[in-house]
Amino acid sequence: MTVLTVNGVERKIDVDPSTPLLWVIREVFELTGTKFGCGIAQCGACTVRLNGRAIRSCVTPIGSLDGQEVQTIEGLAPGDGERHALQTAWIQHQVPQCGYCQSGQLMSAAALLERNPSPSDDDIDAAMDGNLCRCGMYGRIKAAIKTAAAASQRTPTEVGDE
Amino acid sequence: MNRWTRRGFLTAGVVVGGGLVVGVALRPGNRARDLSRYVAGDAETLVHTWVKLGADNVVTVIVPHAEMGQGAGTALTQMLAEELDADWELVRFEEAPAIPEFANHPMGKGMLLAGVDIPDIVLPTVDGVLLRSAQALNLQITGGSLSVRTTGEYGMRIAGAAVKEMLRDAAARSWGVPAAEIVARDSQLIHEASGRIEPYAAFAETAADMTPPASPKLKTRDEFKIIGRHVERHDIPSKVDGTALFALDLRLPDMLYATTRRAPVFGGGIARLDDSKTRAMEGVVDVVALPAAKVGGIVGRFESAESVAVVAEGYWPAKQGLDALEVEWLETGNESVSSEAIFAQFQRDIDAAVDRETDEREGDVETAMAEAAQVLTADYRVPYLAHTCMEPMNATAKVEDGRCELWVGSQSPLQFRQAVADALGFPPEKVTVHNCFMGGGFGRKSRADCAIQAAQLAARIGRPVQLIWSREEDVRQDFYRPAIQSRFRAALDAEGNLTAWENTYVDKHEPAEAPLIPYAVPARDIGHVSSPTHVPFGAWRSVDHSQHGYFTESFVDEVARAAGRDPYEYRAALLRDKPRHLAVLRKAAEAAAWSTPLSEGRGRGISLQESFGSIVAQVVETTIVEGRPRVDRVVAAVDAGLAVSPDGLRAQIESGIVFGLTAALHGEITIENGAVKQSNFSDYPALRMSAAPEIEVHVIDSGHAIGGAGEPGTPGIAPALANAIHDDTGRRVRQLPLDLFDLQYQPEDTRLRS
């Protein structure tokens, strides 16, 4: 039995402890915003935050997460009907095409901005290089991260929806 | 407006819940040349569109194309809203398959068919888009960069215009004024003389009794207000909060999960299966051997071999169970085939040139070669490529009481329906396809192989099954972008003018014009020989343009260099009869400041490629870092006739460039012992952010027919980069991917020089 917090809600789970977090999130908790892409931590589609840090849930055994805090894309917005500054910037820059990688991109970006509120281009590259986008929207992702960073700096109390 | 008569079969309006629903089904009586090319025989092609006008004055456009990221839904909606003079804020779109009442059942059929003589072959299903008999189909349904060009131009606009005329006539009748005095604006009808203003919805019911006009008047481009305007894509909000529904995200009561494997050597059946370990594993429900099946398709092979699947309580136990299976596969005779052997075969077949077929021949190539001051020869080649959509292949099926429901991301839902029906032995009307967002398509999701497996499993198990392929299976059981080898010979006169162009390659696929060049060369002989292999192939973003764009635009660069001329100026001179192409080339060159020298240690290259009705020029700037090309900047110019959604077009070109760049730098599927060597993003890498160039896209609205957007960005990046590498290093790369070469230390690769 593993007890962990997912998007602020305590969850108890009793499965094979080697089961990757990804499949528990998607199949047991039915939080399907987090995606399967490669299964070997090469593409970043499965990125969630573990105690704030971006991790690849496809290679993280559920058994290792007792007492830990997980945030998925479903928990990124500050509240119902609101958007995180990154989500707003993502829409402004019309980032997604197919959209499949975007939950992972957003979670990596959220972890980056939390520890580094005004990242340089190199900082962004370093934080985001584990997240593939086969639609190739890297330029837009980078621009959106900068927009979100600037917005958060400017109006720290109004980082929600515009 | 006379490319096509645009005579539509508009269905009589039907009132549904107080609103108006009008369908339009268009038959190309006088087919546009561009479309008829894709239409074999006399089979009818129908473009089918729906528009709903609700009591709340909201217009809902039902988009009959699947969304795989290209944004077609939004662009198509703009086209309909434009002709309807709708208030954009009151316009919604829905992807057709998500509308159960329009699904493949009598109501939808009855509505479309009401009083309209439509050929039997046309099945007016929700997923019916560009329909005709399956055998005559040689075009992807969502593919070929065709959504806006066909459905938009011939379906959406006519539907919008027709509905507007019906509403105006209804208002005229109600108000007792001439229809000509009524103006439609922002979803309202206005009669200025009497000061009357009412929303469209007020006339929906009256309009529903009218006969739709066969040839409604369409706007001219100078009247456009919504087409050409930046609008936000409708699907994006759901893609930033995790709510967008991909097929993989479906959750059904009682659903099981499965994963599957085929023989590593294509076509191998199961010789022996020992599932004893697997069956003993916790969570495993069943192990199922699945038969070979016909998967349908447009380009390439249409069959997939037997497979073995593990069905379990979750993907993880299914995967563990699959890994524990002991399977021996039947030999196919291809167990010793390698990439080297395949390319050696291509080389032999080009050398022999037996049964060479001509794509284009003009002038006297042999005489020009004999009289040339200089003859250039070169062989180029590119490998097989996988699609690696971000979303691995998957499908969910429920089979119950002789019916099958299928949730899948498909570029060709009708074909999927037929293929699944055939595999189950059901009539097609017993199969319902719910099309979901696709996490990438790129041509791969026009194949029903995975969908058939899911349906077979659900039928066998008696519970809904979500089948998910591992990434390894996705890489190793693709329908690959074909490997091609291409040989060139060019003749130059004493002034360096290009007098003859000869090109022979293996193999030919689609589209037919891919190897043709836009340049004014007096003698041309372009042809191909056949050299089949056992590797399954299919359409891959931009189809054969991805290979030939690299070949022809690299070789013309070689010719320019051999002539001692600037490659841009040389191309420009050869485009004297092609002002539209020249304008695009010039735009890219000027925007990239072509004439301003780069700093030392950097190279610049250019390319020009017409594909899918659009012309794209690209200028690439590169720096060689530790023997590898770093792409610093790409400046592209695109003439797609008219940019319906300018930001959407730019986004597609950016995307096409990065997709092509991944292939140019890294893409290689290698065949070893008859099977694919690569397995995942670890050994089949994709471009990452730190290597992504700055991309600048310049859009030219030339006023020509609307061209494609999804594919035309892809072909030109590889040659522009190879040309930039030559500019910087003096070395000509005639083989991709560039990862094969150390551009700093090793001598030029000469393996392919003749």
Image (cartoon, coloured by chain):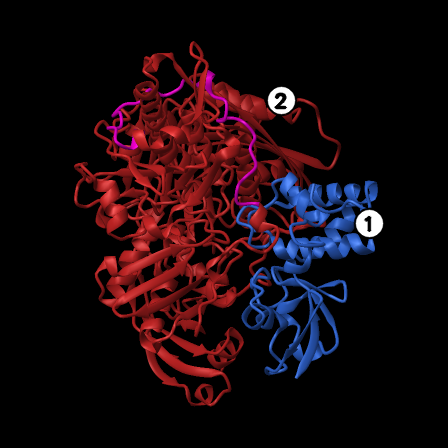
Residue B490 image point, x, y percent? 43, 31
Q: Residue at x 37, y 32 (%)?
A: B156
- Output the letter for the chain in blue: A
Q: Is residue B711 left or right of residue B531?
A: right
Q: Residue at x 22, y 49 (%)?
A: B135
Mark 1: amino acid: Pro
Q: Which mark is residue B590?
A: 2
- In this view, the residue in front, B263 or B535, is B263
* Residue B196 among magenta residues: no
Residue B576 image point, x, y percent? 46, 16
> What range of the chain is rendered magenta?
B207-236
Disc 1 vs disc 2: Cβ atoms closer than 8 Å? no
Helix, strand or loop for disc 1: loop
Kindly report which numbered mark, 1 or 2, lies closer to the viewer in this rendering: 1
Q: Residues within 10 Å of mark 2 (few under 14, many from 20)?
A: some
Position of B62 relative to B244 (above/below): above
> Mark 1 vs mark 2: same chain?
no
Residue B398 image point, x, y percent? 36, 68
* Residue B213 among magenta residues: yes
Chain B display color: red
